[in-house]
Amino acid sequence: MKFTSLLLFLIVAASFTSCVTTKQLTYLQENTSGTDTLALLRKKQEPYRLQINDLLSIRVKALDQETVGIFNPINDENPNVTGEERLYYDGFKVDDHGNIRIPSLGLINVLGYTVDEVREMLEERLLRDYFKAEANVFVTVKLAGIRYTINGEINSPGSNIIYRDQVSIMEAIANSGDITLTGDRSDVVIIRQYPAGQKVHHIDLTKLDAMNSPYYYIKPNDLILINPLPQKALGTGTTGLQSFTTIISITTALVTTILLFTRL
């Protein structure tokens, strides 16, 4: 009788410790419960500085439309290319030396600059060499979307592009179908590109304080990795019922084997 009670206790305890808990699945948890929490950003996000392989969309407008056409390679009337394909062919890619190549202006180094700094640089150059102040030169410089790659315990792994100036890691995950039940939300890995190479960063998305992390907003060419929880390696199930069923099956097989040997 004592053996049976002990066995039942161990089965129940094991089933609940091996399943995935609600705390492991909940994003941005508050430290307190029952009251509203104001998540203040403690530090302003630093503007993104251009890296190698970034793709820029640059448009020039002025009163002199004929001259402006020299600097705008994109033909809005061309029906054969649209969306991302158009940006691939007509955007300005930052080469291995940190330069972009613009018609008539030639090579311009943009490595480490923000898009606003590049815009100011181009406006100054155009006013100095091609236009007068009365031409009302207007330059638009934008990142051609934020491309990222996400792999691991995610419902839709792969490379994606979001046409926004700023994208949070929560938006990137939602855009990829959300993390699976067996994905570790408490230790999301971000491999980010820097001029000197790549660095590995970690962020805990189960805590509200993640919104203050310098890695909460993704950058172009980020690689996001979602590692599995230990429960997946154990193979005991993601819910209490699944774990209980698995352990019952194993225990039943074990008890049956012991009984067979003791009767021999």
Image: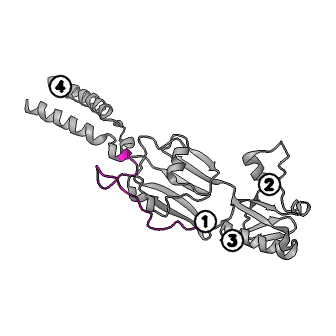
| The image quarter in which residue 18 lies | top left
Q: Amino acid at mark 3?
A: Glu
| The image quarter in which residue 68 lies | bottom right
Q: Amino acid at mark 2?
A: Asp
Q: Amino acid at mark 4?
A: Leu
Q: Is residue 97 visible?
A: no
* Distance Cα–Cα, label 1 vs label 2: 22 Å
User: Which of these two is toward me, 38 or 196?
Assistant: 38
Q: Do tag 3 and tag 2 residues touch (Cβ < 8 Å)?
A: no
* Distance Cα–Cα, label 3 vs label 2: 21 Å
Residue 185 located left or right of residue 84: left
Callout 1 crowding tier (Cα within 10 Å): few <14, some 14–19, many ≥20 = some
Position of the C terminus, as image quadrant, is top left
Q: For mark 3, give the secondary structure.
A: helix
User: Which of these two is toward me, 9 or 213?
Assistant: 213
Nearest to N terminus: mark 1 or mark 2: 1
Q: Which residue is mark 3?
A: 117
Q: Which residue is mark 4?
A: 259
